[in-house]
Image (cartoon, rainbow, N blue to C red):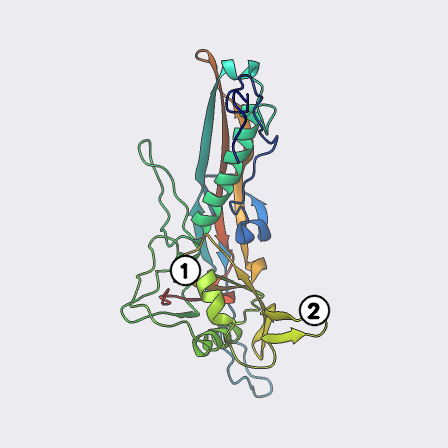
C-alpha cells in the first residue's frame, strides 16, 4: 500500500501542538527509616551533650547483725557529646521563569525546593549511618556529626583486622576483612545485647544483607509458602523472634552494605539545633534564590542497648 499522490500528512503539517503530559514521574527512593523513626530532641548548642550510666555487676551481699556500714565506692556518669552538622542546599531560578507556562508544575521554584528538601533528607540519613568521627569545625572547616557506627562498642561483631572506635565520637571504626553475614553472628550479637541489658526492636540492613536474612532458618521468622487460590508465593521476614528479643528487619538504602545495625530505637535521638527551613535569600540580580537548611546531630543515649555486625561481605 502507498499514499495517494500529494497526500498532506502529519509529517508535512506545521503548528501541531505538543503532546506532553502535565505530570512529572519520579521513582527515586526518598525513604529515611532511621531518621524518620527516632525521637527529635532540642539542641541548644553546636556541641550537644548527654550522660550515660550503668549498674555495677551483681555480687555476694550478706552481713552480720550490728556490723558497721561502709559506703561503696561510686563511679561517676559518663558525659558524651556530638557536634551539630549543617545541611544546606540552594536553588537559583531566573525571574524569566515566572512568565513561562510549564508542564507538570506551576512554578519551577516550588518544584525545585521540594526536590532539594527530599534530597537533603537523604543526605541526613546517610550521615546518621556513616562511619564518620565528629569534627568540631572552625572558620574554614565544617562541623560534622559522628555517625552510628562510631558509638557502638559493647556488642559488635567484625572481621579480622577490624576494631571498635573509642566510643565517644572522636574516632571512626577500623574496617576489617569482610566475611559472610550469618545467622550465627546475628544470634550471638543479639545475645550480647540482651546480656548488656538492651531491648532491641529493629534491624537496619541493606538489600543485599536482607536477602541473606531471608535465608535464616527456624519457624519463628521466615515464611515461604504458596497461598491457596491466587497462587502467590509469599516470602517475608517481618519479625525475627529469639530468646534475646524480637526485632523487625528494615531494609535501608543509605547505610553501608557492609554494616548491619541492631537498634533499640528509643536509645537514639536526633538533636535538632535548627529545624528544616525554606528561606528566601537576598536578591542580587534578575533571579530568585532560596535555600533549605537543617542543623542537627545524632544522640546515642546508651550504646550498650544496641549492637552492630560489621565487615559483612557484599557480594
Q: Observer-nearest residue: 141 or 260?
A: 260
Which residue is the extreme one toward the bottom? 64
Distance from Cα at disc 2 to Cα at disc 1: 35 Å
State the image coordinates of residue 180 (x, y, percent, origin top left).
37, 72
Q: Is residue 161 above or below residue 9?
A: below
Q: Residues within 10 Å of mark 2 (few under 14, many from 20)?
A: few
Q: Is residue 309 visible?
A: yes
Q: Is residue 301 above or below residue 287?
A: below
Q: Which residue is mark 2?
A: 230
Regarding mark 1 in the picture, which secondary structure is present there? loop
Q: Is residue 43 visible?
A: no
* Residue at 55% from the left image edge and 24% from the top image edge: 9
Regarding mark 2 in the picture, which secondary structure is present there? loop
For marks 2 and 1, the one nearer the N-term is: 2
Q: Observer-nearest residue: 68 or 302?
A: 302
Q: Is residue 127 above or below residue 75?
A: above
- Residue 121 marker: none
State the image coordinates of residue 130 (x, y, percent, origin top left).
40, 52
Q: Observer-nearest residue: 93 or 148?
A: 93
Q: Which residue is mark 1?
A: 257
Amino acid at each position: 500500500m502507498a499514499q495517494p499522490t500529494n497526500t498532506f500528512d502529519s509529517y508535512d503539517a506545521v503548528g501541531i501542538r505538543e503532546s506532553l503530559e502535565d505530570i512529572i514521574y519520579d521513582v527515586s527512593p526518598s525513604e529515611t527509616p532511621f531518621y524518620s523513626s527516632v525521637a527529635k530532641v532540642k539542641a541548644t548548642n553546636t556541641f550537644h551533650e548527654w550522660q550515660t550510666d550503668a549498674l555495677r555487676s551483681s555480687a555476694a551481699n550478706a552481713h552480720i547483725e550490728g556490723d558497721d556500714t561502709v559506703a561503696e565506692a561510686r563511679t561517676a556518669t559518663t558525659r558524651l557529646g556530638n557536634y551539630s552538622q549543617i545541611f544546606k542546599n540552594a536553588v537559583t531560578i531566573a525571574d524569566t521563569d515566572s512568565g513561562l507556562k510549564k508542564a507538570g508544575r506551576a512554578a519551577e521554584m516550588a518544584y525545585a525546593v521540594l526536590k532539594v528538601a527530599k534530597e537533603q533528607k537523604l543526605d541526613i540519613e546517610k550521615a546518621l549511618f556513616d562511619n564518620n568521627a565528629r569534627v568540631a569545625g572552625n572558620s574554614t572547616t565544617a562541623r560534622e556529626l559522628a555517625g552510628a557506627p562510631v558509638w557502638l562498642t559493647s556488642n559488635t561483631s567484625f572481621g579480622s583486622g577490624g576494631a571498635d572506635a573509642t566510643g565517644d565520637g572522636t574516632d571512626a571504626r577500623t574496617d576489617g576483612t569482610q566475611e559472610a553475614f550469618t545467622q550465627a553472628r546475628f544470634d550471638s550479637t543479639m545475645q550480647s545485647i540482651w546480656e548488656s541489658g538492651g531491648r532491641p526492636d529493629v534491624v537496619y540492613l541493606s538489600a543485599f544483607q536482607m536477602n541473606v536474612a531471608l535465608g535464616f532458618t527456624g519457624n519463628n521468622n521466615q515464611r515461604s509458602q504458596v497461598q491457596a487460590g491466587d497462587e502467590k508465593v509469599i516470602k517475608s521476614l517481618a519479625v525475627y523472634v529469639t530468646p534475646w528479643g524480637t526485632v523487625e528487619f528494615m531494609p535501608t538504602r543509605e547505610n553501608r552494605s557492609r554494616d548491619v545495625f541492631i537498634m533499640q530505637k528509643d536509645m537514639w535521638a536526633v538533636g535538632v539545633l535548627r529545624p528544616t527551613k525554606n528561606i528566601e535569600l537576598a536578591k542580587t540580580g534578575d533571579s530568585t534564590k532560596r535555600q533549605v537548611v537543617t542543623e542537627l546531630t545524632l544522640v546515642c543515649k546508651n550504646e550498650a542497648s544496641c549492637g552492630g555486625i560489621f565487615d559483612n561481605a557484599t557480594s
